[in-house]
Amino acid sequence: MAMYDKGKPYVMHEEPGLQTYCSCGLTEEAPYCDGSHNGKHTGKRPYLVKVEAERIVSICGCGRSAKLPYCDGTHKSR
């Protein structure tokens, strides 16, 4: 499986709290980590993000952003 199947960001509304975003691309719950990396020796760990306030976020879907886990528009340069 490719690191990420989706070439566009995941744009979503997040509530305050801890969010765990996938970094390996194996999750079935994208963009959230579902633990699919466990035991697979991917060398990847999920991105743990503390959301301080309710907001809209753009989580990278292509895996090439310089600001992971957030989208920086790199997917547009394909």
Image: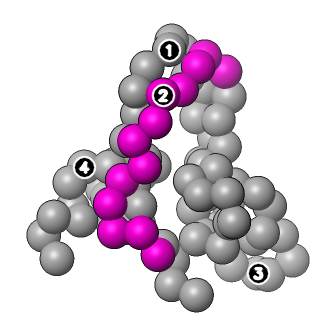
Whole-percent x and y of residue 9? 36, 53
Residue placed at 51% from the left, 84% from the top? Answer: 2
Which residue is the extreme one toward the right?
39
Sequence order check, earlier mark of 4 and 2: 2
Res. 19 mark: none
Task: Please name which of the two marks, 4 or 2, marks the residue nearer to the observer.
Answer: 2
Marks 4 and 3 sit apart, C-alpha to C-alpha, by 28 Å
Sequence order check, earlier mark of 1 and 3: 3
- Residue 13, compared with residue 66, is above or below; it is above
Look at mark 4 in the image and give the residue it sits on: 72
Task: Please name which of the two marks, 4 or 1, marks the residue nearer to the observer.
Answer: 1
Tell me the quarter of the image containing the N terminus: bottom right
Marks 4 and 2 sit apart, C-alpha to C-alpha, by 17 Å
Crowd band around label 2 with a 10 angstrom C-alpha radius: few (<14), some (14–19), many (20+): few
Look at mark 3 in the image and give the residue it sits on: 41
Look at mark 1 in the image and give the residue it sits on: 54
Judged left or right of residue 37, residue 60 is: left
Residue placed at 68% from the left, 28% from the top? Answer: 18
Most foreground residue, 56 or 68: 56
Res. 13 mark: 2
Q: Is residue 46 at least partly visible in the picture?
A: no
Give the number of callouts: 4
Marks 2 and 3 sit apart, C-alpha to C-alpha, by 31 Å
Magenta stretch contains residue 42: no
Q: Which residues are magenta?
A: 5-17
Marks 4,2: beta carbons within 8 A: no
Residue placed at 66% from the left, 73% from the top? Answer: 26
